[in-house]
Image (cartoon, helix red, strand yellow):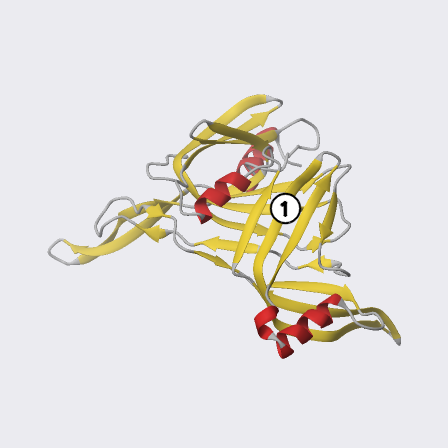
Amino acid sequence: MLTARRLVAACLVVSVPWIAHAAATRSDSVSVQVARGTTTQTTSATVSGGGVKFLYASQAVGTDRFRTTVVSAREAAPLVAEISQTGMNTTVTCDLPGVTKVSPIEIRIAPRVTSSGGAVETTFAPGAPTYANVTFSAPRAKGESALGTWARTAATSPGTARRDVTVALKGTAGDVRTIVLRGAMPVLYSPLETSWQGATVLTALETLEVKVERVDVGGAASTFGGEWLGATLRGQDARADVTVTYFVAESAARTTRYTGSFLAGYKTTEITVGARGFTERWEIQPGPGAQPY
């Protein structure tokens, strides 16, 4: 059985900002506050990382030339936060007819090194964004399908095959989250993928993998991260001050601040159309001078 001290330590290591995290017997949780200019957002989440990575070098010392290892530099490790975009009255939609599954949607903004050689701390700035391919799945039905039609268009008239696809989480008051795949173009079509149990077909699907030129993440102003990610992708000021607070029995037990941080990645879980939501994974690169000790 975990002692109270070990339970607190486990929560600190495994979780920290975007999905509310509660212990089995008390109301432990984590909040993340992101401040950009005059805008501040606070949310609960599950997190990992956000520590310090130490880089080492070895050198010979003394007349006998024994080698010793010393710290040559340090850098802030990425902070990974997950937030569940789910509600009692929300529904996932996709404007591509017949689609039931959408593979994880991912944006990478690889940090580029800005510090000079020999610096005691490695510092970073946002790099150029890249977008992973996305795969749509739909039940194999009789007749023509939206995925098959799109694949045929790409084969016979590639100049007209590019299109935008929107995945949305809709609530009673409007869109909670919208993800628009801009300029999507087919790269791989599979007309039939089956799974079996004995002599019985359990599933019969068709799939279409597409490459995208850009991904726009939006939605309600109160939904975390959309404006921050949009500014990053537009090359605007992408820095934010991030504060992570760990609460034990509703009392703040530890607070860690990361100034001048920026987004290094965004990724969803696999998305099921008609479900009540999905989970988003945000990767944050802390700014220089972070001291999460």
Q: Looking at the picture, does residue 39 appear above or below residue 190?
A: above
Q: Is residue 208 left or right of residue 47?
A: right
- Of 234 and 33, nearer the camera is 234
x and y, in percent, of residue 171 in the image: 73, 38
Q: Is residue 59 left or right of residue 230?
A: left
x and y, in percent, of residue 237 in the image: 39, 40
Q: Looking at the picture, does residue 287 appear above or below residue 216?
A: above
Helix, strand or loop at disc 1? strand
- Which quadrant is the C terminus positioned in? top left
Q: Residue furthest left?
A: 63
Amino acid residing under circle 1: Thr
- Which quadrant is the N terminus positioned in? top right
Residue at 55% from the left image edge and 55% from the top image edge: 106
Q: Residue furthest right?
A: 199
Residue at 75% from the left image edge and 35% from the top image edge: 172
- Of 114 and 11, nearer the camera is 114
- Of 77 and 178, nearer the camera is 178
Please say whether residue 293 is visible from this viewpoint.
Answer: no
Looking at the rendering, which quadrant does residue 6 occupy? Answer: top right
Mark 1 = which residue? 178
Looking at the rendering, which quadrant does residue 8 occupy? Answer: top right
x and y, in percent, of residue 170 in the image: 72, 42
Q: Residue furthest top?
A: 251
